[in-house]
Image (tube, rainbow, N blue to C red):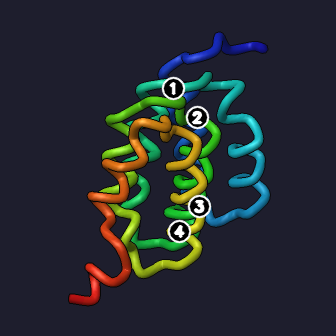
Amino acid sequence: GIVPEGNVSAVETICSCLADSSFLLTSCALNNITRVAGRSNKTALKCLVGMLSSSTCHVRWAAADGLLLVGQKGDRYLLAKMLAVVDNPDRILRQDLVGAIAGVLLPEDFNAVVRVLGSADAKSR
């Protein structure tokens, strides 16, 4: 490629494209984020985690999809950040986050995740 993988300016630019109102630009950014950022890129993860709290639903969805692509198995920091917002009332965001969580979750993390999320029965009390 023209820009070396992980170039901070390129990573920030591609992440900002995820917030664009154009579906075509957002799709293009998602298709290329791993090539530009690489897996587990700290700049990309920071941008994407920040976008999860956007007031615009399509930005939250794109951020969750980006995390699914860039997140690395065993990244506990990323896992904690996603668990913090997984109770969002936005159903599509929750679905995307569950996929991203599954992508970083290690077998030994399962019990801790269940404790954090609790059962539906426990949450109703």
For mark 1, what is the residue? 40
Q: Which mark is residue 31?
A: none
For mark 4, what is the residue? 93
The C terminus appears in which quarter of the rendering? bottom left
Tag 1 near tag 2, CB within 8 Å:
yes
Judging depth in this view, the residue of 90 and 58 nearest the camera is 90
The residue shown at (49%, 38%) is 107
The N terminus appears in which quarter of the rendering? top right
Tag 3 near tag 4, CB within 8 Å:
yes
Tag 1 near tag 3, CB within 8 Å:
no
Q: Please state which amino acid type lies under the numbered disc 4.
A: Leu
Above or below, comparing residue 91 to residue 25 in the picture: below
Above or below, comparing residue 15 to residue 10 in the picture: below
Q: Where is residue 79 in the image (x, y as percent from the top left)?
A: 39, 43
For mark 2, what is the residue? 70
Q: Please state which amino acid type lies under the numbered disc 3.
A: Asp
- At label 2, counting other C-alpha atoms closer than 10 Å, the crowd grade (few under 14, some 14-19, many 20 or more) is many
Find numbered disc 4 in the image and state the secondary structure of the residue it sits on.
helix
Which of the marked residues, 1 or 2, is nearer the chain's N terminus? 1
| 3D distance between C-alphas at marks 4 and 1 | 20 Å
For mark 3, what is the residue? 96
Tag 2 near tag 4, CB within 8 Å:
no
